[in-house]
Image (spheres, rainbow, N blue to C red):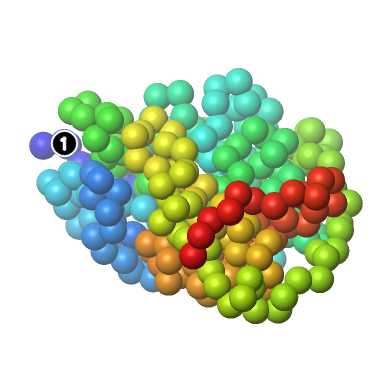
């Protein structure tokens, strides 16, 4: 049994660090060692999240459950999660990040809080992730500090999620990130060619086939569900389905989308739509055929 006293303190530190950049609400999800959802508490206030940690941290240790939080920032702040960042990239982001978290040996998350007038937030976040070499499909959720990262590949020595650096209250602007070389060049916007308004004869792509063809998640033999979601959305949009309808359908198809909610589904569909625009602008190609 782990000594969970220090874990509770670290969890509270993480909540406080998010609060320092304006976050006041969190979604809390529990998953087991096989990454299956075991519980979900949407939009918990900062006070409620803090009060629950003395119970959730010891419980996660007993049950080998992951405690995952999704911070909900105020509208004035854009939170950007730089996931799966390697050691080589840390120096580039540490001056701008309000928090850096180690999720396993050699794997880090950087968290940025950005304010100011940004015309297209989703595109800007994508460009920052690209410049940092981070996972382009980051979900915006993180295992809370002080808990173990329960994945079978780590058994029996599960690594502890830890805050390795923090600058509470650190909020940056887009020009500051550009000066640090953390914003990739924008790509010219291109309009989608006209397509049928209701998809290819009203049919949807096969989600199962996308999942079967997805690459393995980092350090795992399980499929990368985020990439499967993205590919499925790309295919649906290329077939002619509108972005919002694709996002709504993704909630029916993907367990991860249901777990992470409408925001995740819409962001995935919008990113996929942008990818389809770029693809059509550069080469006349479509995603591989995925039978309904």
Residue 179: image location, x then y, percent = 83, 36
What residue is shown at x 63% (from left), y 57% (from top)? 234
In this orientation, does residue 85 appear? yes
| Depth check, front residue: 26 or 238 | 238
Residue 48: image location, x then y, percent = 34, 68
Q: Which residue does the numbered mark 1 point to in the structure image?
A: 2
Residue 54: image location, x then y, percent = 23, 55
Task: Give the number of callouts.
Answer: 1
Q: What secondary structure is found at the residue carrying circle 1?
A: loop
What residue is shown at x 46% (from left), y 44% (from top)? 213
**Residue 191 sits in quarter:** bottom right
Q: Of all residues shown, which one is farthest toward the top?
A: 88
| Depth check, front residue: 16 or 137 | 137
Residue 88: image location, x then y, percent = 60, 20
What residue is shown at x 47% (from left), y 44% (from top)? 214
What residue is shown at x 70% (from left), y 52% (from top)? 286
Q: Is residue 204 left or right of residue 52?
A: right
Residue neighbourhood size for the residue with mark 1, other residues' Cα within 10 Å, grouped as few (<14), some (14–19), many (≥20): few
Point out the image quarter for the N terminus. Answer: top left
């Amino acid at each position: 049994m782990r000594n969970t006293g220090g874990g509770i303190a670290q969890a509270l530190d993480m909540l406080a660090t998010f609060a320092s950049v304006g976050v006041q609400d969190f979604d809390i999800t529990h998953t087991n060692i096989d990454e299956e959802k075991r519980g979900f508490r949407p939009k918990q206030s900062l006070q409620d999240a803090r009060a629950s940690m003395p119970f959730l941290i010891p419980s996660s240790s007993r049950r080998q459950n992951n405690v995952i939080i999704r911070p909900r920032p105020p509208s004035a702040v854009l939170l950007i999660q730089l996931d799966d960042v390697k050691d080589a990239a840390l120096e580039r982001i540490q001056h701008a990040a309000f928090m850096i978290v180690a999720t396993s040996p050699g794997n880090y998350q950087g968290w940025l809080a950005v304010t100011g007038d940004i015309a297209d937030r989703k595109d800007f976040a994508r460009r920052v992730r690209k410049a940092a070499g981070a996972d382009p499909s980051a979900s915006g959720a993180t295992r809370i500090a002080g808990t173990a990262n329960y994945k079978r590949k780590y058994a029996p020595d599960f690594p502890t999620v830890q805050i390795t650096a923090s600058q509470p209250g650190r909020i940056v602007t887009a020009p500051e990130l550009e000066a640090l070389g953390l914003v990739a060049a924008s790509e010219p916007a291109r309009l989608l060619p006209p397509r049928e308004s209701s998809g290819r004869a009203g049919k949807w792509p096969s989600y199962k086939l996308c999942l079967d063809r997805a690459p393995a998640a980092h350090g795992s033999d399980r499929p990368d569900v985020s990439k499967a979601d993205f590919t499925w959305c790309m295919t649906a949009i290329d077939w002619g389905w509108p972005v919002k309808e694709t996002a709504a359908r993704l909630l029916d198809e993907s367990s991860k989308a249901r777990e992470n909610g409408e925001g995740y589904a819409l962001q995935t569909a919008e990113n996929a739509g942008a990818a389809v625009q770029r693809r059509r602008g550069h080469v006349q190609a479509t995603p591989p055929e995925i039978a309904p």
